[in-house]
Image: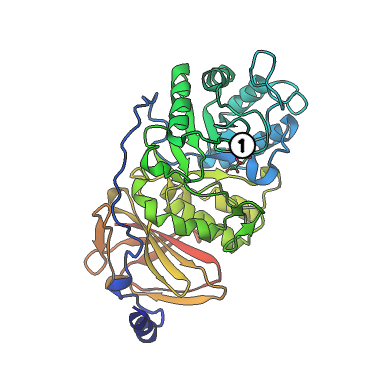
Amino acid sequence: MKNLLTKCLLTALLTVFTCSALRAQDEAAPVKVEKKAGVQKVTNLAPTPPMGWNSWNTFQTKIDEKLLRDMVDTYVSSGMRDAGYQFFVLDDGWMAMERDKNGSLIADPKKFPAGMKAFADYVHSKGLKFGIYNCAGDKTCGGYPGTRGHEYEDARLYASWGVDYLKYDWCNTDSLNAREAYITMARALQATGRPILFSLCEWGNHQPWLWANGVGEMYRATGDITANFDKDKHMGSWTALSVMTILDKMPAIRRYNGPNHWNDPDMLEVGNGMSYAEDKAHFSLWCMLAAPLMAGNDLRKMSPQSQSILTNKEAIAINQDALGISAYRYFAFDGLEIWVKPMNNNNWAVCFLNRANHPQNINYVWAEHALHDAQTKLGVDFAKTNYKLRNVWAKKDAGTTKTAFKQTIPAHDAVMFMLTK
Ligand code: GLA
């Protein structure tokens, strides 16, 4: 293999990637899936990857009604809602430290003086859907009251507030069985009669891709993300994962992704400290993966660059494609990768990613490539079929696949094309 790589490098020097041995390198051996869990879902709640905003990545538990109302207002005025983002989700820290004397959860009265129903009404009044967080354990990860033993009453309370989305975490769960705990909560949500999207968050510890289809609409596949392109962050007892570390975990489970059961590589860190190029690459890849798009930045202070990334409708259209197929890594060598996503109507999205710390030249002769997705059996031979190219970030038509794509891709950047016939 090493010889092959060297030969590839020497003969092609990143000019043409025709080494078929390197193709589809992330195809994993088939694994048996446990189908459905017997939870009858209300409706088709997430035919395409859910999109929204969540308070955690920027604010952790430092949230309150005033801050969040401003965030809702900016969600609308910044164009996020019009770009397709729908959910406004409060993560950990919204509750009082104790349940009330009847055992009911209450919103922290200092943070939410008008109560949670009033806040939910405000979110709804802006044409958004309202999401909330809790945990399958005795306490949430932040130490607030968890739902264990209160599943049905908590679900009824959320429904009475008008909750449309529940993120359900996995801290302080001791001996609980993950599959059973999530099924119990899914049934409790179901029993309310209100459509509530269920977002499982057990970090991929119990392979939810094998059993969560039919339990919830999305399931975290990894540990928590951090706003770093390729360096994990050690946090003492756990490690926050960089964008590239998470990306590398996704090909092995791509086959489990699809309408109403989305692999969740965690929320977006766009606007949270990475460079413009890195943010663009991060967002491109989450679009390619057909991942949920949950923004996590301070919308009130969003830079024009972050806004242009998060609201790029052409990138979002790739993410929201009706087939819901996650991209596969077609080529990887020396930090340069090509990710490929089969799409509806025989369209394709292709993303060139430069993970290296230096710019790289690419001269990609489309006609020398035939794509074949072993999972979906979809394929295209560019020697025989000509596609129109649209550069999603430049927002420009870029000729056709008859002409080679030549460009220098800066370090940690990505170029994403939409290919149509
Ligand atoms: C876990 C989750 C995060 C966030 C925090 C809240 O770490 O994975 O996404 O919800 O808990 O405490």
Q: Is residue 392 visible?
A: no
Q: Could you tell whether 295 is left or right of 10 in the image? A: right
* Mark count: 1
Q: Is residue 368 visible?
A: yes
**Residue situated in front as seen by the camera: 85 or 79:** 85
Q: Amino acid at mark 1?
A: Val
Residue that appears at 63% across and 18% down: 104
Q: Residues within 10 Å of mark 1 (few under 14, many from 20)?
A: some
Quarter of the picture containing the N terminus is bottom left
**Residue situated in front as seen by the camera: 158 or 346:** 158
Q: Could you tell whether 393 is left or right of 171 in the image? A: left
Residue that appears at 73% across and 38% down: 62
Image region (quadrant) for ligand 1: top right
Q: Is residue 349 above or below residue 405?
A: above
User: Where's residue 58, x and y in %?
Assistant: 67, 46
**Residue situated in front as seen by the camera: 95 or 393:** 95
Residue tagged 1? 76
**Residue situated in front as seen by the camera: 275 or 314:** 275
User: Where's residue 116, x and y in %?
Assistant: 66, 23
Q: Could you tell whether 345 is left or right of 294 in the image? A: left
User: Where's residue 98, x and y in %?
Assistant: 70, 24
Q: Residue furthest front?
A: 175
Disc 1 residue lies near ligand 1 with CB under 8 A: no
Quarter of the picture containing the C terminus is bottom left
The quadrant holding residue 99 is top right
Q: Could you tell whether 254 is left or right of 162 in the image? A: left
Residue that appears at 51% across and 19% down: 152
Residue that appears at 70% across and 21% down: 115
